[in-house]
Image: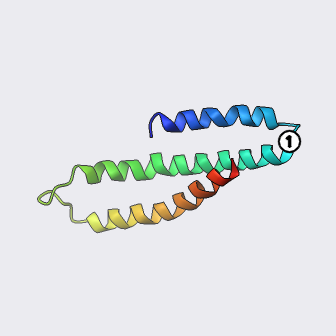
Amino acid sequence: MTALMPVTLASIVPVLLLANGNRPGTFWLTLAGLALFVVALLVTLMIEVPIAKRIRSWTISTLPEDWQRLRDRRASVHVVRWPAASPDSACW
């Protein structure tokens, strides 16, 4: 994910530049895809990654009392991330 995300973001910029003015439909769909991609990326980096890092360090003996709350939080955030991440692929 570390290399793929910046490369994906960088690949959208030339499409926006080439489509601007000449192909308005392509431009607006690509821009919508970029916006949704950024939303999915921010949700992933700001919420899901920190939770995943905490979960990775758990063992049966070190399982925290609130593990179910963290699991539910990650699942509820995924409900926001998935709708943002799915249509962005269709837009561009």
Q: Position of residue 91 (x, y in %)?
A: 69, 51
Tell me if 49 is positioned left or right of 55 in this view: right
Q: Position of residue 68 (x, y in %)?
A: 29, 68
Tell me if 59 is positioned left or right of 75 in this view: left
In this view, 5 is above or below 32:
above
Tell me if 20 is positioned left or right of 14 in this view: right
- Picture quadrant where residue 90 is located: bottom right
In this view, 8 is above or below 29:
above
Q: Nearer the viewer, residue 89 or 28?
A: 89
At mark 1, the secondary structure is loop
The residue tagged 1 is: 23
**Quadrant position of the N terminus in the picture:** top left
Q: What number of labels is visible?
A: 1
Q: Residue at x 31, y 48 (%)?
A: 53
Q: Residue furthest left?
A: 61
Q: Residue at x 83, y 48 (%)?
A: 25
Q: How is the image coloured?
A: rainbow
Q: Position of residue 4 (x, y in %)?
A: 50, 37
Label 1 CA crowd tier, 10 Å (few <14, some 14–19, many 20+)? few
Q: Residue furthest right?
A: 22
Q: Position of residue 61 (x, y in %)?
A: 11, 59
Q: Residue at x 15, y 56 (%)?
A: 62
Residue type beneath disc 1: Arg
Q: Residue at x 45, y 66 (%)?
A: 76
